[in-house]
Image (cartoon, rainbow, N blue to C red):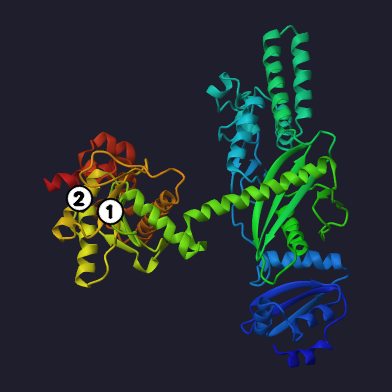
Amino acid sequence: MTADQFQQLASTIPQQPGVYQYYDEGNTLLYVGKAKDLRKRVSSYFVKNLTSYKTHELVKRIHRIAFTIVDSEHDAFLLENSLIKEYQPRYNIMLKDDKTYPFIVIKKEPFSRVFFTRKKVNDGSEYLGPFTSVGRVRELINFIRQYVPLRTCKLNLTEQNIQKGKFKVCLEYHLGNCKGPCEGLQSAADYAEGLQQVRNILKGNLGSVVGQFKAEMQALAAGLQFEKAELVRKKIDHLENYQAKSVVVGSHFADMDVFSIVKEDNLAYVNYLMVQNGAIVQTHTVPLETKLEETETEVLSFAVARLRGTFNSTAKELVVPFAIEVEEENLTLTIPKAGEKKKLLELSVKNVDYFREELRRKKILHLEDKSDEEKAKVLYELQDFLQLQEPPLHIECFDNSNFHGSYPVSAMVCFKDGMPSKKDYRHFNVKTVEGINDFATMKEVVYRRYKRLLSEAAPIPQLVIIDGGKGQLGAAMESIIELGLVGRMTVVGLAKNEEEIFFPGDSHSIKLPWNSDSLKLVRRIRDEVHNYGISFHRNQRSKGTFKNELEQIPGIGKQTALQLLKEYKSVKKVREAGMDSLVALIGKKKAALVTAYFNAEN
């Protein structure tokens, strides 16, 4: 849309608060924005002295403008965030965080189970979280199970089933981890009290849990059950120690959310600390990509709204470095200058800095953002460590892959100047090898690769990495010798787990320095070939490209064939399996078909 075209439209734009939406010629939503005065804000995009290249590019693509009038700026903020979250327009701020966060679910069922899940289903169950760390969730569940006896079985504990005596207590009951609701040894009301303790623990409210245990301990002591009272006392001690370790703020503080931001060019990093009952219960840092040179205030406002929604925060106080717009009108905004809240904000900034540093370290592994000089330095370092005749500007790496001992394939990735050259990646369906033979497979694919390069007079790599043991390296060298390539390239093996590099014929391996850029490059190459091979293998299986001999047996379907292969690992072992073993796995009728098929071969 040109400035002249906009002038014809300008008078129709309302001078009221609202949200505007820009669409391109294909009616794709490009951008969503809010404004106190829609006409004034939208007009600013069509002035002739635009300084931002990105804004200029956006304006060139605008074909249609839509408006939604609201009652206030606050309502406009809410609607803008809702539309951005739903449509993720190309030119709006992008939250670069696509993780699926874990929850702890209290299942809607008699005597509810408590367990970890990543899927939030609308089934009436209670979902606590989400949490930023799977490790943290597992730690919490283990912690809960130490102090709150709950069932872990999947029995259908309806009142009718319990009264009929359908179930018997298991080992968990005898270990004291469950009170035996399956046999009616625990009432639903008592079990519900345990679930309330779970909720309190997850919210950091350990005081009420400790209080309940103290009352229980006193009752046991009054009843002269001193051994049981001592066990409860130990639980109280552990809970109080756990609480002492968790409290880093102060129990006098109300719940609050703390946010900090660091912005660099078109990237911003926002850290979020969730404080409940005087303890930091969650911490999370996210990267955001800005598209139209948004200010720190705009980015932080967007991030606060999104993160509070994601983590279901109900805190009524926000601690932030500067004033921002917020979704909820009854929130208290605190910009601390000193004291404990200022220390919390500084802690949040430390988390942002740590996150940025970790990203920087990871980028050492990926050379995309390095200068040519930095890339060359890594390759010269690798040349020096491996004593190569020249810098390995062209590196290729091979890896074999199979599925439960069947369907062998191989993959090769290519790096040039320290960067992935994906157009040169190759995958190989093994042609000449019967069954699973990693050595023969490696020999075949290495031969095919370099026979092809020689026939096309294409450049050959300075360094070839064989991801496997000495056997695979020896097999690869057989092909290198047959092709007359000895001395024209360096071939090394890379131990699967140890990250040791060894040369043909050497009894001792070498290790690159653990913190060197060259080792990180080798790891990157190894991971790349592994992932490329696995992806190819998965695609081939899903397309049904691989043929399983077991599927040729009349009366045996694909699922049964796969079941046999998973259990016995190879067709050979299925052939050797006894009748009793087969019957136990797939039933008498199918076992007879399999046995008859292989007996007919003999």
Residue at the spot of label 2: 475
Nearest the viewer among 459 and 545 is 459
- Percent x, y of residue 156: 58, 36
Amino acid found under the numbered disc labelled 2: Ala
In the picture, measured across the screen, residue 83 lies left or right of residue 541, that is right
Numbered disc 2: secondary structure: helix
Mark earlier in primary sequence (1, 2)? 1
Q: Position of residue 547 (x, y in %)?
A: 27, 57
- Asked if residue 285 can be seen in this view, the reply is yes
The secondary element bearing badge 1 is classed as strand
Q: Residue at x 75, y 56 (%)?
A: 304
The x, y position of residue 526, in whole percent, is: 38, 52
The residue at the point 66 percent across, 76 percent down is 54
Q: Which mark is residue 173?
A: none
Q: Nearer the viewer, residue 218 or 480?
A: 480
Q: Residues within 10 Å of mark 2 (few under 14, many from 20)?
A: many
* Farthest-out residue, top: 224
- Kindly identify which numbered label has been placed on residue 408: 1
Foreground disc of the pair 1, 2? 2
Q: Quadrant of residue 302?
A: bottom right
Marks 1/2 in contact by CB < 8 Å: the verdict is no
Q: Quadrant of the C terminus?
A: top left
Identify whether 474 is placed above or below 546. above
Residue at point 61% right, 57% down? 97
Q: Would you say residue 129 is visible in this rendering?
A: no
